[in-house]
Image (cartoon, rainbow, N blue to C red):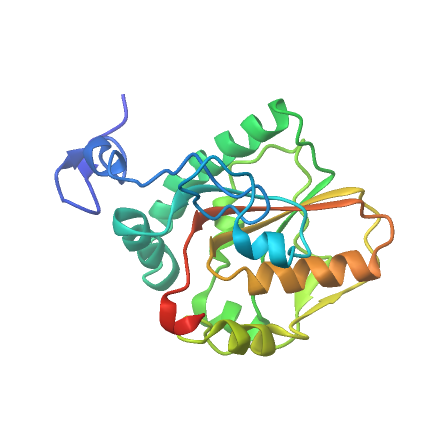
Amino acid sequence: MRPRQACIVCSEPSHLVVCQSCEDEFSVQEQRCLSCALPLNQSLDYCGNCLRTSPSFHRAFTLYDYEGVVAYLIKKMKYDARLSVARFFAEKMTKKIVHMQSSGHHYDAIIPMPLHKKRLRERGYNQVVELLRGLNKKCALDTTSVQRVKQTASLTDLSLAQRKKEIKGAFALAAPLTHKRILLVDDVMTSGSSLNELAKIILKQSPSVACCDVLTLSRAQLNESQI
């Protein structure tokens, strides 16, 4: 039996860093755009944005909506160095990837969103790499092929146009990738600008890559003032 501890959210006794009651508050929308994982209210396959302009990546998957308890926990993980939260979510990410594989979505390599070396020194870890710690050796985790060569400003308060401009030229490949199917992983997708730029660079410079999908821990949305 796992030792009991205090839930990081409500401080009630828990076997995990997050108690079951708080986990039950995670927002999980089943109906999502097949292209960008944006929640959909109707029985549609794609959102209006993706119908107008498809992203560079082929398909997006996510676990949760970025709101409430999930948003609180991700901020704790990223900015307060609560790696116990990363370990908690790593189990969820591993189960999701295993489920995707059993459903026919197989990948030759899994690439976590890279951090700029200065940001990595400041934070001490890449939270996305920590989210993938639960993967076994059968899943090829590639942390070296792609580098973040531009230290971008925070995208949080930027508009969609500003995000696209800021992230342009942020990534570089050490060499063309030889994998055929790649899964890009990040903690949060809001506009998708970072993942779209990363996928664009990979597909442009790596003719061998036939599929570049995306998996995020959570999916957020731009507010009206940012569109």
Quadrant, the N terminus: top left
For this view, does 27 lie left or right of residue 48? Answer: left
Residue 164 higher or lower than 183, as above or below: below
Residue 222 higher or lower than 110, as above or below: below
Q: Position of residue 62 (x, y in %)?
A: 49, 42
The image quadrant that residue 150 belongs to is: bottom right
Residue 142 higher or lower than 122, as above or below: above
Res. 114 in view: no
For this view, does 183 lie left or right of residue 219? Answer: right
Q: Where is residue 160 in the image (x, y as percent from the top left)?
A: 50, 71
Q: Residue at x 52, y 78 (%)?
A: 162
Q: Residue at x 64, y 73 (%)?
A: 170
Count the marks.
0
Q: Which residue is drawn at 37% across and 73% down?
A: 225
For this view, does 66 lie left or right of residue 131? Answer: left
Q: Which of 36 and 118 is in front in this view?
A: 36
Q: Where is residue 217 in the image (x, y as percent from the top left)?
A: 45, 46
